[in-house]
Amino acid sequence: MTLADPPRTRAEQQALLDAAYRHCAAINAEHGKSYHLATRLLTADRRPAIHALYAAARTADDLVDHPGPDPAGDLAEWSRAVLAELAAGWSDDPVRLALVHTYRRYGIPVEHLVDFLAAMTSDLDVTGYADMDALDRYMWGSASVIGLQVLPVLGTAPGVAREEAAPHAIALGEAFQLTNFLRDVAEDVDRGRVYLPADLMAAHGVTREQLAEKRHDARFAALMREMVAIVRRRYDDAAPGTPMLAPESRDCVRAATDLYGGILTEIERADYRVLDRRVRVSKPRRLAVFARRLTAAQLARVRVTMAKPNSRSSTGA
């Protein structure tokens, strides 16, 4: 692997960096519609970094979920490249370039990226989880560190240390991940993986074979009902963290929480039938959530500007 040298002029570097961030935004818009809508509530200086973090996570995840002939080799090469480029400060790959710039700009610990890549690597071999403790250990790398990556970009309110908000950011990352697991049971089992704890499945009399055969019954509905309750408790754990964020970032998080929480509501409305259909929040519902939060987000920006007319953003942007 040969590291790319940055262009000689600052203008050339900035042009490539701007293009890289636009590329990441396009990935977010295509694959993360609810998440992308929520990011539009962020201030313009914060938005590109969130797109970069999403696009990098999506790219690594796709190497596992939509593999080529050598998924382990492809993921290992991508991982080696991004870690080396993070140390060097430049990449000729647009997603990795935006990620490198974001990590360096916001001082995000490299350990978060290492843990995320380790979780993605485990998906190549691990096909199930014995209990919630085992699933939580996996989610440290696949979800918890995502919350910790995003936190420096969102910023914290005056007087709130990042460490104080971190447990709530972790809980929200886990809540989003668990919501995806419940929505995507059928897709995941088709890939040979089950993210429902095996002990809870056994307690409800649900087998992997039933999931693979897409057989919905009262036992599966009861299992999903219990899982929805578990996920809602994670959202409850995350909730106290939103007021700890920079005021101009809160409505983005509130919108994302409303939209992802809405997936749980749609699962309930569908009587937990996620094996033979993909449950989703409707576009009118997504737009309604965005519209409701938009005015509040704009007001928050005005208040911050009026209170600190000559100061820099709390993220250091």
Image (spheres, rainbow, N blue to C red):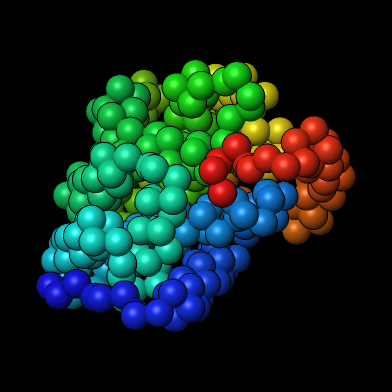
Q: Quadrant of residue 250?
A: top right
- Seen from the viewer's position, the closer of residues 97 and 272 is 97
Give coordinates of residue 260: x percent, y percent. 62, 42
Horizontal arrangement in the rendering, residue 139 relative to residue 106 (left or right): left
Give coordinates of residue 66: x percent, y percent. 33, 67
Marker count (numbered):
0
Identify the residue at horizontal 21%, vertical 64% (top origin). Answer: 81
Give coordinates of residue 243: x percent, y percent. 67, 24
Identify the residue at horizontal 53%, vertical 52% (top origin). Answer: 50
Inspect this view and state whether residue 265 appears.
no
Identify the residue at horizontal 56%, vertical 66% (top origin). Answer: 25
Identify the residue at horizontal 55%, vertical 41% (top origin). Answer: 315
- Seen from the viewer's position, the closer of residues 75 and 190 is 75
Horizontal arrangement in the rendering, residue 66 relative to residue 29 (left or right): left
| Vertical side of 175 occupied by 14: above or below | below
- Seen from the viewer's position, the closer of residues 21 and 225 is 21
Horizontal arrangement in the rendering, residue 305 relative to residue 2 (left or right): right
Horizontal arrangement in the rendering, residue 95 relative to residue 31 (left or right): left
| Vertical side of 237 occupied by 174: above or below | below
Give coordinates of residue 285: x percent, y percent. 79, 50
Q: Quadrant of residue 7?
A: bottom left
